[in-house]
Each structure stands twice: as structure tokens, then as C-alpha cells.
Image (tube, rainbow, N blue to C red):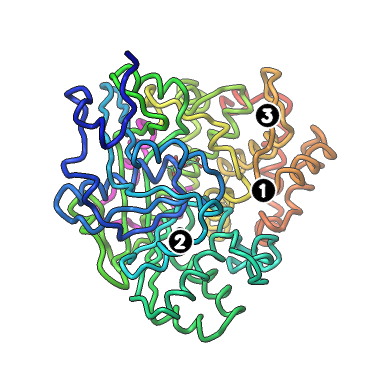
Amino acid sequence: MSPPRLSRHSLPQLPAGIRRPAYDPANIRIGIVHLGLGAFHRAHQAVYTDDRLAAGETGWGISGMSLRSPTVREALAPQDGLYTVLERGPDGDAARIVGSIAEVLTVPETPERAMARLTDPATRIISLTVTEKAYCRARDGGLDAAHPDIRHDLAGEAFPRSAPGLLVEALRQRRAAGAPACTILCCDNLPRNGETVSRIVTEFAARRDPGLAAWIGENVTFPSTMVDRIVPATRDEDRAAVAALGYEDAWPVVAEPFTQWVIEDRFAGPRPRWEEAGALLVGDVHAYELMKLRCLNGAHSSLAYLGALAGLETVSDAMAEPALAGFLPRLWREDVIPTLAPVPGVDLPTYTAQLAERFRNPAIRHRLLQIAMDGSQKLPQRLLGPALARLRAGAMPHAIAMAVAGWMAFLLGTDERGGTHGIDDPMGERLSATARAAGRDAAALSQALFAIDEIFPAELAEHEGFRVAVREALGRLLAQGVRKTLAA
Ligand code: CS2
């Protein structure tokens, strides 16, 4: 007999020892719409929410929506939204079934249903993990009105395609229907993510109807958040690991044991008591955001480019190489920690040492190429921001220059073991073409890339000392390889 497929119906038959919802998932009501139903949300916010549902806050079920691909709906709808979080630590695995996703939709498949849920008076929170690029930000941080999806949505002739367009249309309809105030909760890795989304949404709305923009200012809040949990993309091996437990789950998620969520406590209406599930509700998130983006994500991106260039596959593989593992403490100590304001209750050297431990977790196979994706969207807040802060303080951020050089070399598309990789990035074609035209000439390559002002702010691109540091690092990477260069 084949093992049962996970669903509400099969829950009671699942093997003992698997933690399952301590409530009846059929009896929860939806209070949250979440856009971007990727692995991260399912191992993070949905788990905090699952805890609150178990504690009796049954009005906070999640309607999970994908903006494009139906693959999550195809996997989870037959499972009534249930899925496994397989927590993998150095000491072994723990499986838990999460029941907080009460409904799974693909927006373009069922746009009316999605809009009805977004505008439902019972929906008080619209949260997002749609990745950096989906906000369609312009160079100045506001709305990129030239973005093809934004142009499509601003024309207002068809159902919106972009996240900002969808949010504004939902808010327009909420206003027209007299729906109660709601909160838009960005959970993507952007600095001041709440303010960023507020600005983009308000600018979009103002182009359609200044009255709507004003209404949003009075009725919608955009708290900032810092989110953290390492959740690699699910692989077939992970599905097999769940099958070995005795049931079938088409899309489990694998996560490290660590999880952190810091939320600015500025909600327009009610919210789950996430603080009782371990979240930290604070007055100001910014110091936490910068710490996490620069220390964790900055180190991740550095490892991704330098490690992939060295022909390595995962973060833990890279951490097993002394040259790469040894690079991070330097990056943190010299170039990152000095740029951070004190974070309440956090000792930064301890925090970064714990990051190194988390990166070493051999049970998590986090592919470097996954992290390397969308570099044009990630570099500015992860590496270029702290570089600028150091330069303004009169210091030369050599470790960051090395990481940026790693990204530049990575764009050439080949690694030191003769492997090749594509550049998965909204600017990928332009970046690859630029790199190809310059070739393995460090001066030409760095100069051509520094000229891309969507990525490099002028203050950085025109800083002679920084340009030289990157060019020299790139020259060494190309001539001697990653290991030799970092060991030197
Ligand atoms: C990673 C993040 O893929 C990436 O860019 O740096 O997804 C990282 O794993 C999370 O932010 C950890 O909280």
C-alpha cells in the first residue's frame, strides 16, 4: 500500500511522533492574506501563526497566494493547505505539520477570488514575501513607473500583474466598500521594508487617484520587519525524507532550527499575538534589519559568489573551506560591524559567531546558486550600503571590495572547476553581455560594471580608492583563483 497523502482527512492516520496542528484546521477563519507562498513564508510567518491558532486565536488563518506560478497550489490544494516543516539541526530532524494556510490561490488563475479575499472586511493583514525585485523599485527607492508590469497596471485596463498594482487595486476596492483599516506587512529582506513598500504603494496610488493615496495614508500602516530563517529550496531528497516518515507530502519545506522575527508594532487593526509565539514586537526595527541584512545576507552573498566561483555547491561546503570560512570574520569585524548601531540585547561578535555556526549546519543543503540569484537587487543593501558607510568614515572596506569582485567574476559565467552557470537576475542579460564584452580583464570588467548606475550609487562608483580595491581584488581572483586570493 502506498503511504497516505497528507490532507485533513489523513491527519489522524499519520505516524505518531509527527507534530500536527493542535487545532482543527477546518475550523479556522481567514484574517491574513499572504502574497508569495514560497518556502520561506511557510517555514516562518506561517509557523508563528500556526502557534497562535493552536493557542485559540482562530481568526488568523492565512489565504496564501502565488502571484504567478500555480505549482504551490497544485501541490498544496490537494493537501488542504497542509505541509511539513522538516527542521534539520546538527542533532537530527523534527517534523511538524503546519495548518495555518487555510486556502491556496494562484492569483492569475482565480483573480476574482483573490480580489474578494484581499478586500474581505475580515482580512486585516496583507503580508508579503515576493522577493526584492517584485516591488519594482526605482533607483531612488520609489516606484519604477517605467517597469513593464507597472506600466501595464497603471493603465488600469486589465487585472494587475505586479505586487504594487495588486495591493493598490485591493486598497482602492476596500476604500470603495468601506472595509476596515488594514496592515501591509512586508517580510522581504529590504532595509526599512515597511517604509519602502509604503512609498511604492502610495506613489502608485497617487498616479491613479490622489484621494486614494491620502486614504491609504490614513487607513493603512506598513510596519517594518526583520525576518530570519535559513530555508533552502525543497529538493526531491527532502520529499523522500518525508516519505520515509510514512506519508506523502508534495511540497514539504526544510528549515534550520533557528528562527527570528522582529516586527514594528504599528498595526492599523487587530493582529495575532505573534509575540507569544516568539516574535519580538518593537518600536523601531531598523537596527535589527541592518544587522541582519549586512551580517547574514551580506555574508551569504559573499559566500555565494566567491564559493560558486570556486566551484562549490552549498553554503556548508563553502564553510568547510578554510579560506572561505576565514574570510567571513574579517568581513564582519572590519567592514560590517563598525557600520551598525547598537542593537538592543545583541552582542554583535556573538551574533556573527552564531551565524558562522548556522552556515556550517551540514544538514541544510543551501545551494550557493540559489543565494547568488538576483544579485543586482541584493548587492546594494547587503554590501554596497556598508561599503559606503565605511568609506564615509574614512576606512577602506577591503573585504567588501573582495566580495563585490567575486560577484563581478561570477558574472563571467564559469567557475574554477570548469563548470558554467547562468546569471539568474532581472538584469541578467545585460550583466552577462557586459561581462562577456569585457572578458577576463579586471580593469575593463570592473569599469564596465561600476558604470551600471541601477546598482552602484555614484558616490561609490566614483570613489577612486574603492574602484582600485575592487579592481585589484578582481585581478587576483581571476589570476590566482578564490582559495589562493583569500588565503593571502
Ligand atoms: C539568502 C536569504 O537567498 C538569499 O539571498 O541570503 O534567503 C537568507 O537565507 C534568509 O534571509 C535568512 O533569513
Q: Position of residue 160 (x, y in %)?
A: 59, 63
Q: Quadrant of the C terminus?
A: top right
Badge 2 or badge 1: first in the primary sequence: 2
Q: Quadrant of the N terminus?
A: top left
Q: Which residues are magenta?
A: 336-358
Badge 3 or badge 2: first in the primary sequence: 2
Q: Position of residue 243 (x, y in %)?
A: 35, 20
Whether 381 is drawn above or below 98: the answer is below
State whether residue 188 appears in this view: no
Q: Secondary structure at mark 3?
A: loop
Q: Amino acid at mark 2?
A: Asn
Name the one closer to the observer, 177 or 254: 177
Q: Name, please, the residue furthest toward the right.
A: 437
Whether 289 is drawn above or below 39: the answer is below
Q: Amino acid at mark 3?
A: His
Q: Is residue 359 left or right of residue 106?
A: left
Q: What residue does disc 1 label?
A: 426
Q: Secondary structure at mark 2?
A: helix
Q: Residue at x 37, y 23 (%)?
A: 363
Q: What residue does disc 3 label?
A: 421
Q: Residue at x 28, y 44 (%)?
A: 47
